[in-house]
Amino acid sequence: MDGSTMTTSPEPYTTPDGRKIGGVVMEMKNITLRFGGVTAIKDISFDIREGEVRAIIGPNGAGKSSMLNVINGFYHPQEGEVWFRGAERGPMKPYEIARQGIARTFQNIALFKGMSTLDNIMTGRLIHMNTSILSQAFWKGPAEREEIENRERVEKIIDFLEIQAIRKAPVGSLPYGLQKRVELGRALASNPQLLLLDEPMAGMNVEEKEDMSRFILDVNDEFGTTIALIEHDMGVVMDISDRVVVMDYGAKIGDGTPEEVRSNQKVIDAYLGVAHD
């Protein structure tokens, strides 16, 4: 494969509910990832399009988290190419990925438990803090304006996620579902173009899942944020996703709309079989 040019983007279209889906934002080309003698991802290709909710699903041990880490730049594949906004992406540091406009949440909550909700979400603004340490120490001029701008952005996110009542509460004292919402807020604070969600519904009850599903759709609709997520709850995936890629034992076994994936016999067999680690 040449790799010097990106494949042609599909034509933009409008979904039945009025959302606009654009061209390809990220493309995974023939990705293979190995850890020693273990192959976690085997020659997988798929793309993520502007404005869509793209789900990555599969049984335990299918390689979903490894794929998300490739998208996030944490892992660099031994074979294949990752393209982002028309350019091939090589190995990058985490802060470089964040500056490209990619943010993520984690399967296991990664918050600063002793800090307040407000302060945790403020850490998502670090990549937008450009004034010098000296200016910040005196907190005048550009530093003051930057601080006010960042706090205004964070307060809007707090209002959006309906967590005003816990803005000053230490996150370690919050119920699990609210901690998940705070983590989503921190990711949104960086103004991501592409938001990666690693099992955002894990461990939630039905009501919490309904709330999180609503917020994910609202983020996509109101902010225009492209979203790629890993999720085990098939009902949630089918309700909120535009397209779904299915992995099993590191290979791709399905890719299409929720309706197409739901009727794919390989997908049905993978989910009806015994989960594997």
Image (cartoon, rainbow, N blue to C red):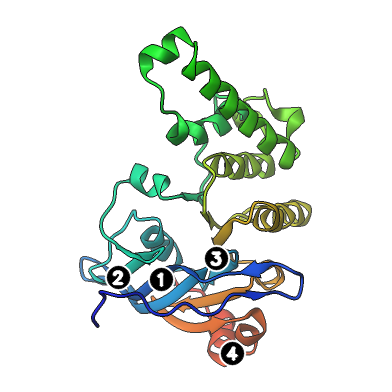
Image position, residue 75 (x, y; %)? 31, 58
Residue 19 is left or right of residue 106, and the answer is right
Image position, residue 241 (x, y; %)? 64, 70
Alpha carbon separation for disc pair 2 and 4: 27 Å
Q: Secondary structure at mark 4?
A: loop
Which amino acid type is shown beneath numbered disc 1?
Glu
Image position, residue 267 (x, y; %)? 55, 84
Residue 131 is left or right of residue 118, and the answer is left
| Location of mark 2 (residue) | 81
| Location of mark 1 (residue) | 27
- The earlier-in-sequence mark between 3 and 4 is 3
Label at residue 264 = 4
Are the residues at dot 1 and dot 4 in contact (C-beta closer than 8 Å)? no
Residue 153 position (above or below residue 29): above
Alpha carbon separation for disc pair 3 and 1: 11 Å
- The earlier-in-sequence mark between 3 and 1 is 1
Nearest the eye: 137 or 272:
137
Label at residue 50 = 3
Task: Tell me the quarter of the image containing the C terminus.
Answer: bottom left
- Near mark 3 (Cα within 10 A), the count class, few <14, some 14-19 or many ≥20, is many
Residue for point 63% across, 53% down = 203
Image position, residue 257 (x, y; %)? 62, 81
Residue for point 41% across, 46% down = 98
Label at residue 115 = none
- The earlier-in-sequence mark between 3 and 2 is 3
Which amino acid type is shown beneath numbered disc 4?
Asn
Q: Secondary structure at mark 1?
A: strand
Which amino acid type is shown beneath numbered disc 2?
Glu
- Near mark 4 (Cα within 10 A), the count class, few <14, some 14-19 or many ≥20, is some
